Amino acid sequence: MPTRRKARPEEGNGDALSTYRAKRAFDETPEPGGLVPKAAPKPGGLLIVHMHDATRLHWDLRLEMDGVLKSWAVPKGPSANPADKRLAVKVEDHPLEYGDFEGIIPEGNYGAGTVIVWDRGVWMPLEDVGEGFEKGKLLFELRGYKLRGRWTLIKLKKTEKEWLLIKERDEYVSTEPYSSESVLSGLTNDELRNAKQRVEPIKKELEKLGAPKRTLRVEDTELMLAETRADPFTWRRRVPTPSPRMGGCSRSSSTAIGCAPRVRTGSRFCIRARDSTIRSHFRRSRAR
Ligand code: MN
């Protein structure tokens, strides 16, 4: 058993996050320790849905309440079809900083497996939250990249932790399944797990091209931002090429396709994301 790291001074003891911290060995897992929760001035706030490929694949719905992310594990994931009532099991509160967490929880640790930010946005309660918890019914609006419109969480009677997540009827109802990639990195859980294999071919190509080698720290690297141009771009002119910055796409391609934030991959390399975009871009270029 690994020894549990003591809470840092800025971390509360016996606050809403003590269960979260007690379950994790922070010298082994890359997950955040969690600062003392500070409640937002008004109800609602951050919406996060993690897709977590652990012992069993599940989604973690997280809604900001009282300065923490109230969390439910949804084994089958959210459905935009009101006919699908999805079991949502209440789990321990997570720190707000967990909202940005995407990575690999190492073997032997709590929740070992890959975690991606499957959706992110804001949520707004449509009824009083305190009363909702007492009654066991929360009605709210979600404004994520994937989850939109009105949803309900209903607690099953005679259970402690079991709720149902149901899509309410509105213009966002659909029978189409949601896409499975991260809204932050564009990676799927499998791609995140296999990041090392994906980096190897790029590394070999760069060595072949004689690219200079040096250690890169994520903190020191700048995001490549989109730039304005005088003329509109054409797909033909913009085929992404791996660049010596190990980012994966060159400056010219980044203006065309945009570059998502980098992700920690567990190795010392970073994948610059949206590979699915890059791949489809390649396909389109080849088709001509
Ligand atoms: Mn989970």
Image (tube, helix red, strand yellow):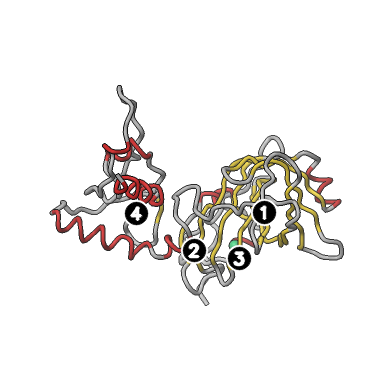
Q: Secondary structure at mark 3?
A: helix
Disc sitting over residue 270 in the figure: 4
Residue at 59% x, 70% y is: 56
Q: Earlier in the sequence, mark 3 or mark 4?
A: 3
- Which residue, given by chain and number where applicable, does mark 3 sit on? 22
- Disc 1 versus disc 2: distance between alpha carbons? 22 Å
Counting from the top left corner in percent of width and height, residue 227 is at 33, 29
Q: How would you rate the neighbour count of disc 1 (Cα within 10 Å): few for under 14, some for 14-19, many for 20 or more?
A: many
Of marks 3 and 4, the one in the foreground: 4
Residue at 51% x, 49% y is: 100
- Disc 4 versus disc 1: distance between alpha carbons? 32 Å
Of marks 1 and 2, the one in the foreground: 1
Q: Say above or below: 163 vs 244.
A: below
- Disc 1 versus disc 3: distance between alpha carbons? 32 Å
Q: How would you rate the neighbour count of disc 3 (Cα within 10 Å): few for under 14, some for 14-19, many for 20 or more?
A: few
Disc sitting over residue 79 in the figure: 1
